[in-house]
Structures are given as C-alpha cells and as structure tokens.
Image (cartoon, grey):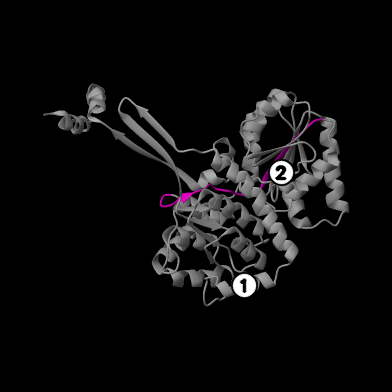
Amino acid sequence: MIKIIDIKEPQEQANELREKSWNMDLSIPTKNVLKIIDEIKTEGDEGILKCIEKYENVKVNSFVVSKEEIKEAYKNVSDNQIRIIKYMKSKLEKSEQAVINSLKNIKIDSDGIKIKKTVLAIFRVGCYIPGGKARYPSTIVMCTVPAKVAGVKEIVAITPPMKNGKVDPLTLVAGDICGVDEFYKIGGAYGIAALAYGTKTIRKVDKIVGPGGVYVSVAKSIVSKDVSIDMIAGPTELLIYTDEKANARHIALDLISQAEHSEDTLCGVITKSKTMATKISKELDTIIRQTNISRKEFVEKSINKNGFIALCQSDKQVTEFINEFAPEHLEIFSKHDKNLIKEIRNAGLILLGKYTPSSVSDYCLGSNHVLPTYRFAKSRSALSVLDFIKLVNMIEMNKDALKKISPIMKEITSTEGLVNHYEAVKGRLVK
C-alpha cells in the first residue's frame, strides 16, 4: 500500500523521499564499468564482441546492423506501426522546428568591435536506445528527431541485441524512418565506451544522448570527461499535484502507468486534501490487488517501495516540496491554483488538467520523453534541438577599438598578474 506522509518540513522531506527511493551503492557498478570501459579502449571491436556474449548472452559475428537487416525489419512490422512512428516523428519535428526557427544568427557592431554569433549543429552524435526489460522504438524517435532537425550530419544509434542476436524490428524501422546513419547492436556500458572512444568499426562521437539503466548512467558519467553527454537520465519519476475535486481513479491509473516501467520508478502525489489522499490510496489498492494488470510485479514493487502521498497544509508547502523534489514529470489536477503554478520552477515536464496524462507525453504530444531525473530539472529541461547545437562566436576589431580598450586591458591584467596579456595588446600599438 502507498504510504501517506504528513509534510511539516517540505524541502527536507522531499529530499528524504528521494534518498530512500535511491539508496543503491554505486561503488560496485562503478568498479565494473571502469573495467568494461578499459576493455573496450584496449580491445576495441574484439572487446565489444566479448561483452555482447557476456552481458547479452548471445554470440554474434558482427555488431553492425546491415542494410539487409533493416530491409528485413520492415517485413516484420505492420503498416499501422509504421504509420504510428511517422505520426510521432511529425509531431516532434513540428515542435522542435519551432524552437530551431526561433534561433537566429546574431551580429553586433559596437565601437569598432564586430561580433557574430552563429548557430551550428554538432557534427556526430550517438544515441543510446535501451533494451532489456522492454523495447523502446519511441526512444529512438525522441533522440534522433531533435538531432536531425538541429542539422546533425551523422547520427549513430546503439541498442542491445535480443536473444536471437538481432535488433527489435520496430526499433530498427523507427531509426531508419527518423534518419539514423549508423546502427549498432551493442548496449550497456560497453556501448557507451564504444561511442565515447571509438573502435576500428565505430568512430567516436562528439556527444552521447539517451536514457539507460544504472550501468549506462554510470558509464555516461565516467566518459563525460572525454565526450559531451546530455544528462544522467535515470528511472522514471512522476509527481501529481491534486485538489479535492479530482478523479482519484484517474490519478491512480497515472501512477500505475509510470510505475510499470520498473521497480525503481518513483511515483508520488502531493495534495492538501486528506480525503483525496485516502481515496487515491484505496483506488491504487483496488486496482493493484483486484485487477489482473499488465506488468503487475513492477507496479506493485514500485508503488510499495517508492510510492508516497505527501499531505501538505498550505500552497507554500506544496510549491516548496515540488521545487525541491524537481520531478521528471509533474501532473497538475486543479483548475484553481494558477498562482501556485506560477511558483513552480523545477519540473522536467508539466502536464495540466485531467485530459493530459503523462503516459501520452511519453509518445505523441510533440514533447520529448527524455527528461531530467535525480533533481536535474533544477538546472535543465527535456532533450531538444538545443542539445544538438552550439553557439560559435567570431570577433573582429580594428586598431582604433584596440587603442580604446588598451588602458582597460592594462589595468585588469595588472590586477590579475597576467601582464603578458597586455603586452600582446601593447605590441600591436607601438609604432
């Protein structure tokens, strides 16, 4: 049964709930990941083949997805599945195109100093697509479409092979539709290492994006000193704020929809209504115990281990809790708390109203389901075209402008003890 907690210290209790849900000792995964990374850096392609056999329990002759395999994949998916992938792609494209269209190259000309800021795409990107407990063709849409819209020239996708040594057909088809240039059947920490450092077959990438399990997250963290990454995207998080008038069953169904991802999912409710808290708890109990729901084992473990209902006394407590918790998904079941909504700063994705369930946002609203977890919603947002571009600055100045700033340079370089910086200016102005 989900626990109901009286909130007295919102920030402190928000942190406690997070820590209790994520109490894994990372020392062993980190030690193992470091060994795996070293193996790939040392053995390259041969190391990858060994890792596939060891971690995926399948032996393959090649980890490269061939054109023939992609053609074969199309034969194993339905026309309706292809239509759905194209629909998801078009919705996300439209959303991301609106963002990229708002970004303009900038020119500034002031006192003889010309500055040009140019938006350029990252050249080569690697997209990690999870496998394991479920297949995620939707994730390849979420990772590759923003990259394509941004103008990335080379998009590489990796995903673990199935027990037959092949890649899930719909994931392959989705990647082909979305413009993947290279596809490899590799996963886990060894896949991240291959993207980061390269092998004879796989050229290293400039950035790695995409969600994964503990080993993938640890690997991304370790290689981030050598290659850019998007974020450490961990287990799914959902926080729902509700008033006393919402439909408790709808809230329970939304919690279950996210809890089915894995037993590590973090799902909670925040409310000022004790009556609503009790209703939600009863609905959850009824659905989980009396209904033969899909993926029941994951749902039950997730709700029992990490689920909570936070009972607050005021709007101030609610906003303090939410902003400290910084959830991946935040659903708001209330039409009357506009001022409260304005105070919310930290959430990966905010979904308003009873007809906007978080489960739909995972697929086809035009939003991205690769979202910040572990409180990273405090400092970043969903994966988007912004993750695949950079702003390059070019500056040119004339002699008069250099003369004008010479005294400023002399003073500041003297203050910092870096006088040779000023000498580089002075040397150009001496006749």
Residue found at x 33% / y 36%: 395
- Amino acid type, mark 1: Lys
Q: Residue at x 68, y 53 (%)?
A: 88
Cα separation, mark 2 vs mark 1, equals: 40 Å
Residue 365 painted magenta: no
Q: Residue under label 2, please give it.
A: 267
Name the residue at the bottom extreme.
Answer: 61
* 114 to the left or right of 319: left
| 258 or 75: nearer the viewer | 75
**Res 316 quadrant in image:** top right
Residue 424 in picture, x, y percent from top left: 19, 33
Whole-percent x and y of residue 9?
66, 27
* 406 lies above or below 178: above
As displayed, is residue 190 above or below residue 57? above
Chain part drawn in magenta: 225-243
* Label 2 Cα crowd, 10 Å radius (few <14 / some 14-19 / many 20+): many
